[in-house]
Image (cartoon, rainbow, N blue to C red):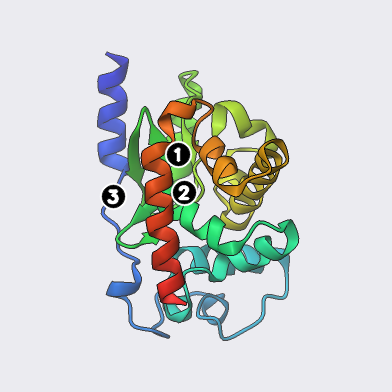
Amino acid sequence: MRSALFAALFYMLALPMMAYAGQQGCNQPVRSNSVQKILDGKAIPASIQYYWYMDEARAEHIGFWACQPITDIFSQVATLSGVPKIVLTAISMNESSRNGIPWPWTLNIKGRAFYFQTREDAYAAIKALLAHHIDMFDVGIMQVNWKYNGWRFKNAWEALQPSINIAIAANILNENHQKTGDWAKAVALYHSANPGMDHQYLQDFVTHMRLVVAER
């Protein structure tokens, strides 16, 4: 009964995606509100709140940001964390790719990905899961597992913030790299603690790394 309830919930919330670079021309306005220039990359955010709006637009790859390389949103975290941005980008493609870009409003429940049109929709789904004491799901652009790593975020809303989600993923990868001394092993461990589950994941990771290099 509960599984049927959640199936119905996610079919209602997982709306068709509208904001892909292929459907938006470079520099084309996508919203009409007071932060339009920031969303279009034509103004510098004057506050952290406006920075988060820009962060979302970069992750959605819309407006001005549709013209930027797919690695753009990973650059700052890569610089601060030391995790190569090509590694972060390729993992995001493994984890949340939708129509050729990593999508920030993604949840994975029992191996099934749900792509939401907005952050608010994804957050509503997380609240519904937690209200029913379901905590085994992956969240955000890097698909951080909530059960094992949710403690790293202040709350579920923050877990969806693209740059924060990426930063937490970088922390996990650095911890894995310290344990293994090898980026391939660190990536495999990011996917699963079970060594038998990493072969296909690493194959996909290498494929995505090549795509990222080709784009650059």
Q: How many numbered discs, if any?
A: 3
Residue 20, picture quadrant: bottom left
Amino acid marked by disc 3: Leu
State yes or no: discs 1 and 2 in contact (Cβ < 8 Å). yes
Q: Residues within 10 Å of mark 2 (few under 14, many from 20)?
A: few
Residue named by callout 3? 15
Residue 110, picture quadrant: top left
Q: Which mark is residue 204?
A: none
Q: Which mark is residue 124?
A: 1
Q: Residues within 10 Å of mark 1 (few under 14, many from 20)?
A: few
Residue appearing at x 31%, y 36% in the figure: 10
Q: Position of residue 137 (x, y in %)?
A: 46, 31
Question: Mark 3: which secondary structure?
Answer: loop
Q: Nearer the viewer, residue 84 or 5?
A: 84
Residue appearing at x 47%, y 21% in the figure: 134
Distance CA(mark 3)–CA(mark 2): 12 Å
Position above or below: 128 against 172: above
In the image: residue 124, left or right of residue 155: left
Distance CA(mark 1)–CA(mark 2): 6 Å
State yes or no: discs 1 and 3 in contact (Cβ < 8 Å). no
Amino acid marked by disc 1: Ala
For residue 15, say whether it is visible.
yes
Distance CA(mark 1)–CA(mark 3): 13 Å
Residue named by callout 2? 120
